[in-house]
Amino acid sequence: MTEHKKPMAEANRISSMLNAVLGKERFPVKVDELAVEYSRQCFPDSPIDKVEGADLEDFDGLLKAKKDRSKWLILYNSAVSSEGRKRFTIAHEFGHYILHRHQQTEFACGDDDIESGDSRDIESEADLFASTLLMPLDDFRRQVDGQKISFDLLGHCADRYGVSLTAAALRWTEIAEKRAILIASRDDHMLWAKSNLAAVKSGAYFPTRKNTIELPPEALAHSNNAWLSNQEQTTRAQVWFYREPQSMPITEMTRVAGQYDYTLTLLLMPDAEWQRPWHGDEESEEDTFDRFIRNGQFPSKK
């Protein structure tokens, strides 16, 4: 029986090799070339033979083996304009190859499977592999340590790794020291929301998978406030989470992701005492990253 491979361990092993060969200023990862060369060197009996764009109307990426499994092919949607999205898609399919190729011979992944942040079996594992490979946490920390978090700083990270702003922001939430929640919204409603572990444990999360949730009228991203020029404000946490203490502040910053037709909101809060989840369902531990809207081209697969 094939041993189950851990996404972060596999991605970190490859990153260590790239550091040794190319040095630490090797970003962004040329993941298409890497997938072909690494598989040929490590799995010569069943390598990835090609990585290429194709007209894929119904999904973003495809990993497929020949009938005898002697060669594998990665395809990505050539209609996608974002190079970062393509890079993440290729890395996601490369993750399936490294982690799951013994389970099946074809992986067809839509925009709700890739870079979604959701906790869902092999798709979440492929996403974790991709984000770890493209944005290693040790290097990511070096980019942000000691600096005030902002979308400008996250934009620097996105440029360094050749990923979307959304992908970089999602990665940052994994290392945020305080409570952090990232929200994508359109037309005053949340498309998805991802809370880090500290926020989830305090009940600060939004169950967007099971519910349609409207932005608070006071939110910067709400159409009520379209006339405002500021992209950051500090207000009462109760605006977003009514069970927070009245004295609890929350910092809110927004950035329009025009290429994907949604607005990102990053919420930051100080530490809180743990409390039992109170949103009325049991979605909390999954970080509530909703399967993304079909026409929203989710967090560009950078």
Image (cartoon, rainbow, N blue to C red):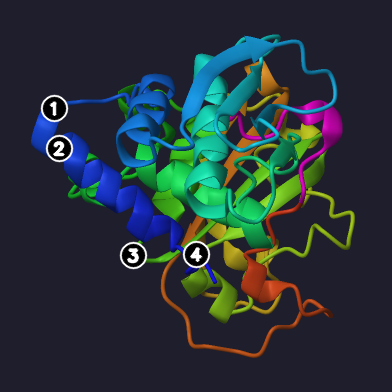
Q: In the rendered image, which residue does mark 2 sit on?
A: 19
Whether pointer 2 and pointer 1 mark residues with C-beta atoms closer than 8 Å, the reply is yes
| Total numbered circles | 4
Whether pointer 1 and pointer 3 mark residues with C-beta atoms closer than 8 Å, the reply is no
Nearest the camera: 214 or 120?
Answer: 120
Magenta stretch holds residue 301:
yes
Q: Residues within 10 Å of mark 2 (few under 14, many from 20)?
A: few
Q: Residue 194's x, y, as percent?
A: 61, 56
Nearest the camera: 58 or 181?
Answer: 58
Q: Residue 201's x, y, as percent?
A: 55, 80
- Disc on res. 249: 4
Tag 2 secondary structure? helix
Q: Which of the two marks, 4 or 1, is nearer to us in this view?
A: 1
Q: Left of 164 or right of it: where is 29? A: left
Q: Earlier in the sequence, mark 1 or mark 3?
A: 1
Q: Residues within 10 Å of mark 3 (few under 14, many from 20)?
A: few
Tag 1 secondary structure? helix
Residue shown at 84% from the left, 33% from the top = 294
Q: Left of 114 or right of it: where is 177? A: left
Quadrant housing the N terminus:
bottom right
Q: Which of the two marks, 3 or 4, is nearer to us in this view?
A: 3
Tag 3 secondary structure? loop
Q: Where does the magenta region start and end?
A: 291-302
Q: In the rendered image, which residue does mark 3 sit on?
A: 177
Residue 26, placed above or below residue 134: above
Report the Cα–Cα distance between label 3 and label 2: 27 Å
Q: Left of 162 or right of it: where is 28? A: left
Q: Earlier in the sequence, mark 4 or mark 1?
A: 1
Asked whether the viewer can see residue 23, the reply is: no
Q: Quadrant of residue 220?
A: top right
Report the Cα–Cα distance between label 4 and label 1: 44 Å
